[in-house]
Image (cartoon, rainbow, N blue to C red):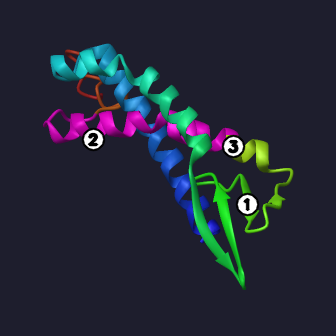
Amino acid sequence: MIIVLSVVGLLIAIGEFFAARSNRFAFKQAQASALWLRVYRWRWLVGVLFAIASAFIYYPMTGGEERYRVMGLPFMVAAFDSAGRDYVGPLTTPSFLANAAIWFFLPHVAFFSWRFASGTKPQTPNQALQPTAGRSDV
């Protein structure tokens, strides 16, 4: 299950990159509704709140006869067994930072979805280029 969550986390990170890029371009070109443009400015505050909250996300997991509390979603940061022993390693800090980044950029996916659902066609900078007048080879 942890491997599946890690793969999902990587796919989310890729989606967030493209959503952030498309949103940034739409914001610069004012290609969205006025409400979207106003609310989009708050994405950093919401992202910081999500990143802070990501430090407190955990879920239960069983392994053999032992129950664990796994910290971190989608990347496992640490695990605690029922006796309170912790299981951390060299990937604890990178996983913590990766989780914070995933949750920090999550509002970009929401804004991308909102813009897409409202009928504004998502564009990247390359798609928005208009052919130069008088040139048929572009």
- Give x and y (percent) for residue 126: 37, 29
- The image quarter containing residue 138 is top left
Say which mark, if any, is on residue 113: 2
In three-dimensional space, the C-alpha distance between marks 1 and 3, rounded to whole angstroms, equals: 13 Å
Amino acid beneath label 1? Ala
Write down the region rendered in magenta: 97-122
Residue drawn at point x = 77 percent, y = 42 percent? 93
- The image quarter containing residue 3 is bottom right
Vertical arrangement, residue 16 with respect to residue 67, above or below: above
**Magenta-colored stretch includes residue 42:** no
Residue beneath label 3, please? 96
- Give x and y (percent) for residue 55: 62, 41
Where, quadrant-wise, is the N terminus in this rendering?
bottom right
Outermost residue to the bottom: 64
Amino acid beneath label 3? Phe
Amino acid beneath label 2? Ser
Vertical arrangement, residue 78 with respect to residue 51, above or below: below
Residue beneath label 1, please? 79
Of circles 1 and 3, the one toward us is 1
Q: Look at the numbered disc 1 and give the secondary structure of its residue.
A: strand
Residue drawn at point x = 33 percent, y = 38 percent? 110
Q: Is residue 77 left or right of residue 4?
A: right
